[in-house]
Image (cartoon, helix red, strand yellow):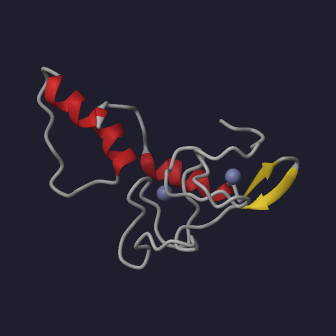
Amino acid sequence: MSTIHKIAYDNRIYQKPRRALPSKVFEAYIFGMDVEWSTKIEEAQLKKNYTIDGTERERIRYGSEVDDWGADKEACHDCAVIKGQYHIPFLCDVERCPVCDEQAIGCDCNYEGDE
Ligand SMILES: [Zn+2]
Ligand SMILES: [Zn+2]
């Protein structure tokens, strides 16, 4: 866990958030990235398809995964979207690939426009 490491070894003292934040949001918070997370989530909703190997595929919304990631109870643990929303593309480790059902960020399929 590099995040934990960074917190431990940085001289600056970071206030740990009171509630557990989704991991990507937490990283953004810790590293002081200029990220308006709600904007990222809104933008993610505009991207409804991926083009994979030349074919358009509809993205898999949070809560529609084969595995249960707890969408009925809480926001995505990684990118903080809620049930029925699209995950933040090429960033969230929960989002499944619509072709192979592996992690969209890690699978071997050929995504066009990978950002
Ligand atoms: Zn997510
Ligand atoms: Zn894939």
Give the residue at x 15% y 44%.
Answer: 16
Image spot of residue 86 (x, y percent) = 58, 61
From this view, report whether residue 11 is shown above or below residue 2: above
As drawn, the residue found furthest toward the top would be 11
Q: Quadrant of the N terminus?
A: top left
Horizontal side of 20 relative to 91 (left or right) equals: left
Give the residue at x 60% y 67%.
Answer: 61
From this view, report whether residue 31 is shown above or below residue 82: above
Q: Can you tell which quarter of the image residue 36 is in?
A: top left
Image spot of residue 98 (x, y percent) = 70, 61
Horizontal side of 48 relative to 36 (left or right) equals: right
Image spot of residue 95 (x, y percent) = 56, 57
Horizontal side of 33 relative to 44 (left or right) equals: left
Image spot of residue 20 (x, y percent) = 23, 56
Horizontal side of 73 relative to 96 (left or right) equals: left
As drawn, the residue found furthest toward the right would be 54
Give the residue at x 87% y 54%.
Answer: 55
